[in-house]
Amino acid sequence: MHTEVRVLCCPDCGTTLGETVLHSGFQSGGTSIGPPTISCPNCGLLIDTGKSEWREKSTLQKTWFIASRVTWFSVSAFFLGSLCGIVVVWGLDENGFIRNVDRQFYFFVVFGIASLLLGALFCANAIREIRESDRRVAKRIAEEII
Ligand SMILES: [Zn+2]
């Protein structure tokens, strides 16, 4: 897996147009939602961003997007959930709030809550990205009709 931040510059006039984060491997589909081309505000030249809009992605790319998000979420949930569980159980234990036998129970409760919260956050984020993408496409189509 490899992550590359590419600074987009206009080849014509050198204006910096922003950055694009490119992933390879399982994350590649997950972070590539965006306009496929942007125009230079200085000279109007169209530049490829290496991204594509959600609607223009193939079924395979869409599946990949979801799969990469789920994988990414699972890994994060596991680590963050465990960390929260350990910290909370340790904190309660130190202050004498829980009995030794209840440790595992509390760990899994915290783990579950942290994972659910993270899951909701990930879903909301993915949905927002797709919606924004759809809005851009709709706007572009409307502009093309005019
Ligand atoms: Zn330019």
Image (cartoon, rainbow, N blue to C red):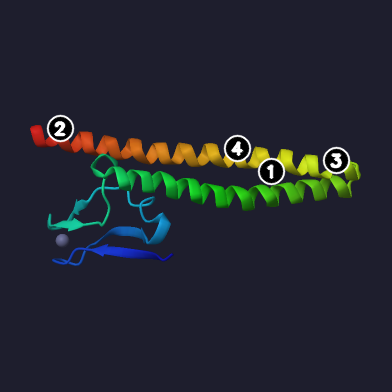
Residue at disc 1, CB closer than 8 Å to ligand 1: no
The tag earlier along the polypeptide, 4 or 1, is 1
Would you name the residue on which mark 2 appears? 142
Which of the image's four quarters has the C terminus? top left
Would you name the residue on which mark 4 appears? 116
The kind of residue on which mark 3 rests is Asp
Q: Which mark is residue 102?
A: 3
Please provide percent x and percent y for residue 6.
32, 64
How crowded is the residue under tag 4: few (<14 C-alpha within 10 Å), some, or many (20+)?
Answer: some
- Marks 2/3 in contact by CB < 8 Å: the verdict is no
How crowded is the residue under tag 1: few (<14 C-alpha within 10 Å), some, or many (20+)?
Answer: many
Q: Residue at x 57, y 42 (%)?
A: 118
The kind of residue on which mark 1 rests is Phe
Residue at disc 4, CB closer than 8 Å to ligand 1: no
Helix, strand or loop status at disc 3: helix
- Marks 4/1 in contact by CB < 8 Å: the verdict is no
The kind of residue on which mark 2 rests is Ala
The tag earlier along the polypeptide, 1 or 2, is 1
The tag earlier along the polypeptide, 3 or 4, is 3
Left or right: 109, with 56 as reference point: right
Q: Which mark is residue 76?
A: none
- Disc 3/disc 1 C-alpha distance (Å): 14 Å
Q: Residue at x 13, y 35 (%)?
A: 143
The tag earlier along the polypeptide, 4 or 2, is 4
Helix, strand or loop status at disc 4: helix
Would you name the residue on which mark 1 appears? 111
Helix, strand or loop status at disc 2: helix
- Disc 4/disc 1 C-alpha distance (Å): 9 Å
